[in-house]
Image (cartoon, rainbow, N blue to C red):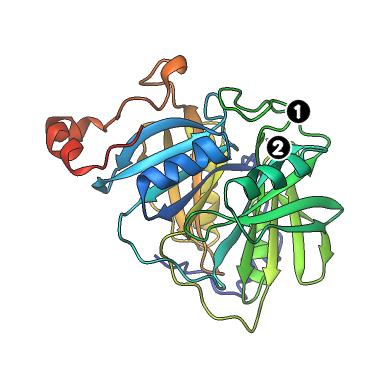
Amino acid sequence: MQSSMSKQDPRIRMGRAMISEIKGLHHVTSLAADAGENNRFFTKTLGLRRVKKTVNFDAPEVYHLYYGDAVGTPGSVMTYFPYGMIQRGKRGIGEVGITEFAIPQGSLPYWAERLAAAGIDRLDHETSFGEARLLFSGPDGDGFALVESATDDREPWTGSDVPEDAGILGFRGARFQLRDAAATGELLEFMGYQKAEAEGDVTRFIIEGGNAADRIDLQALPGAHAAQQGAGSVHHIAFAVENRDAQLNVRKALMDTGYQVTPVIDRDYFWAIYFRTPGGVLFEVATNEPGFDRDEDTAHLGEALKLPARYEPLRDKIEGRLPVIT
């Protein structure tokens, strides 16, 4: 699905009222190879909670695994489609290159030691926009960063062995890698983000008054090759709105501006719409309702395999094809 909006579309530049309903990130969805390895990395190494174990609604032979805080608060949830023997993706332009998690101020040394002990190599320390960051890769070469935040008052999941004063708080944001960041920057401003500052080839956009997963960095890499999706690649990035009415307002505004947007799709735990950006990244706008406790008690989130109603008659067949994960 490609956007019908050209890179020089005047309709945003000429001052259309910007969207006000978007509240920051909702979730990030990526591709993986091995489901068990993916589950161990996020629940054991990173200490997140698996808040839902379901299937890809379009390919029920593949898991859809969700990891986040205690209840899967929008802005904290990393999700994966583990496709088994899928080829590893190739990093490049036209993708989310780094997914960034917020951690408490002063906890970076703990994480550097923990990740090194877990056998994760290529740990890179840097400072970006005045924030201390630790860059590292996931099991499939996924690009991640842990970013210290002194102002984030979210609470981490405390059901792992990660100390509460070091626990991951949710997303800080994401960094896109693009050939030309200008058109995507205009889109973000239309979606309610404000251009904050630039540092080298990276421009930061922040949304005010939303959740704490409130920043997007656009890195312009005009000479880089195009990304190829595979294991370790971000499939799409989702932005949060409070409810379905807000989502419909966003959908209309995007379509009025020239974007091709899908109809609203029921994903059981939220409603979703999708559209492709000028830079090639797939955007989703997802509702904060109804949440991950709609079919499981909060104390037992992510334990049982949950299926959409249309797949329940096929449960035995589906469970027989899926690898066992605990």
Element under label 2?
A: loop
| Residue at 49 percent of width and 54 percent of height | 139
Looking at the image, residue 215 lies above or below residue 275: above
Taking 320 as reference, is 238 left or right? Answer: right
Q: Which quadrant is home to the N terminus?
A: bottom left
Viewer-side residue, 214 vs 151: 151
Residue at numbered disc 2:
212
| Residue at 41 percent of width and 15 percent of height | 297
Q: Position of residue 95 (x, y in %)?
A: 54, 65
Q: Position of residue 80 (x, y in %)?
A: 42, 47
Taking 178 as reference, is 59 left or right? Answer: left
Residue at numbered disc 1:
153
| Residue at 60 percent of width and 38 percent of height | 75
Q: Quadrant of residue 8 in the image?
A: bottom right
| Residue at 33 percent of width and 62 percent of height | 86
Viewer-side residue, 269 vs 189: 269
Q: Are marks 2 and 1 in contact (CB under 8 Å)?
A: yes
Taking 203 as reference, is 241 left or right? Answer: left
Kindly report the distance in space between the C-alpha atoms of the residues bearing marks 2 and 1: 9 Å
- Residue 274: assigned label: none
Element under label 1?
A: loop
Mark 1 surroundings: few (<14), some (14-19) or many (≥20) residues within 10 A: few
Looking at the image, residue 23 lies above or below residue 89: above
Q: Quadrant of residue 230 in the image?
A: bottom left
Which amino acid does the dot numbered 2 rest on? Ala
- Earlier in the chain: of badge 2 and badge 1, it is 1
- Could you tell me if residue 264 is visible in this image? no
Which amino acid does the dot numbered 1 rest on? Asp
